[in-house]
Amino acid sequence: MKRIQMVDLKQQYLKIKPEIDTALLNVLDSSVFIGGKQVTDFATNLSEYLGIKHTIPCGNGTDALQIAMMALGLQQGDEVITPSFTYVATTEVIALLKLKPVFVDVDRSTFCIDTAAIKNAITPKTKAIVPVHLYGHAANMEEVMAIAKEHNLFVIEDNAQAIGGDYIFTDGTKKKSGTIGTVGCTSFFPSKNLGCYGDGGAMFTNDDALAGKLKMIANHGQKVRYYHEMVGCNSRLDAMQAAVLNIKLSLLDEYIAARRKAADFYDKAFTGHPKITTPFRAGYCTHVFHQYTLILEDVNRDALHTFLAENAIPSMIYYPVPAHRQKMFEAFGGSDYDLPVTDWLTERVISLPIHTELDEEQQSYIVNKVLEFINK
Ligand SMILES: *Cc1c(COP(=O)(O)O)cnc(C)c1O
């Protein structure tokens, strides 16, 4: 049996090694390392894949969120509604820009922002909502967009974990996750569903003016070189990463199918177990399984994690401390929040290995070890 990893980037690389190596050597040969055809081609290819007008590449997913908030003109003290049950980047950039993060609870089944909680959190200072499509499952965007429309709020989708997922509206309209809100943000961190071999990120929008602003901010606030209209930053996707992404984008649907197949295998093994809740799949989206996350009840989760590690099976707790309980947010009144679902989930979730190279032999072994511990 191959060694089990949370993500197996090496095996994935070996399958596409000739194409990747050639593409990278071509970048070296051209010596165009920043900008250039690889980057513009990738932006065009990704826009086409997502069915969106503009893709603006940038340095990483965290920058994408930050630049989006800057481009929307959010001002110091403006309130931004975000789940606490997410990766730190989502909430951190809000605070970094001196905006006020307003943490809300998540839905117990989808792990994504609770739309009823959004309504309760809206004040006259609210300017934006940041839904996170956590683990690869979309937030209820139809409701999020309805609330945003009613209260005239921006929606910044954190799509770092769900690129390629479909969202289906009640009227049957289909859109890719990340293309529904005012602006969508994603990360190409190596372990993401569409990952490069370093750092990378992008923003998506259908709004021409906003696209121009996003691009300008990511490039030191300039449209014309050396004429800086506003304070921006330096955030770029480099040519090597774009070359890798151009190849991997053509495989993204295959990669998603492989993840979904692995999730089906786990589901079959765990569904119906009284102590295990398998990942919920809402009818409104296709789950792209960035993570395969179980909820365990009446199980010593941390002892399971250790037991699995002893048996050469990695597992992860995403995330061990929710945003509102981070020291980082003490000054933002983090500890004043009461987010029972977030706390409940934080104590009970565990993510099992899932990636494009996982095989059934590995999965059977994982399933057997999980059940051996839980049924003990
Ligand atoms: C990975 C991730 C980010 C940040 O992406 P980086 O490229 O690491 O900056 C933001 N939000 C979520 C939900 C993520 O998973």
Image (cartoon, rainbow, N blue to C red):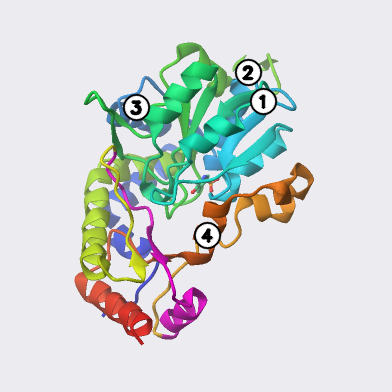
Q: Are marks 1 and 2 in contact (CB under 8 Å)?
A: yes
Q: Mark 1 points at which residue?
A: 232
Camera-nearest label, 4 or 3: 4
The CA distance from mark 3 to mark 1 is 24 Å
| Front-lying residue, 8 or 362 | 362
Crowd tier of the residue under label 3, counting other residues whose Cα lies within 10 Å: few below 14, some 14–19, many 20 or above:
some
Residue at the (32%, 71%) spot, across then down? 274
The reply to whether the residue tagged 2 has its Cβ within 8 angstroms of ligand 1 is no
Lower position in the chain sequence, tag 4 or tag 3? 3
Crowd tier of the residue under label 4, counting other residues whose Cα lies within 10 Å: few below 14, some 14–19, many 20 or above:
few
The CA distance from mark 4 to mark 3 is 38 Å
Q: Where is residue 78 in the image (x, y as percent from the top left)?
A: 69, 26
Report the span colored magenta. 285-310
Give the SS element for disc 2.
Answer: strand
Q: Name the residue under label 4.
A: 344
Indicate the amino acid at tag 4: Trp
The CA distance from mark 2 to mark 3 is 23 Å
| Front-lying residue, 27 or 361 | 361
Does residue 249 show up magenta in the picture?
no
Indicate the amino acid at tag 1: Gly
The CA distance from mark 2 to mark 4 is 46 Å
Q: Name the residue under label 3.
A: 47
Lower position in the chain sequence, tag 2 or tag 4? 2
Q: Where is residue 241 in the image (x, y as percent from the top left)?
A: 44, 43
Q: Name the residue under label 2.
A: 222
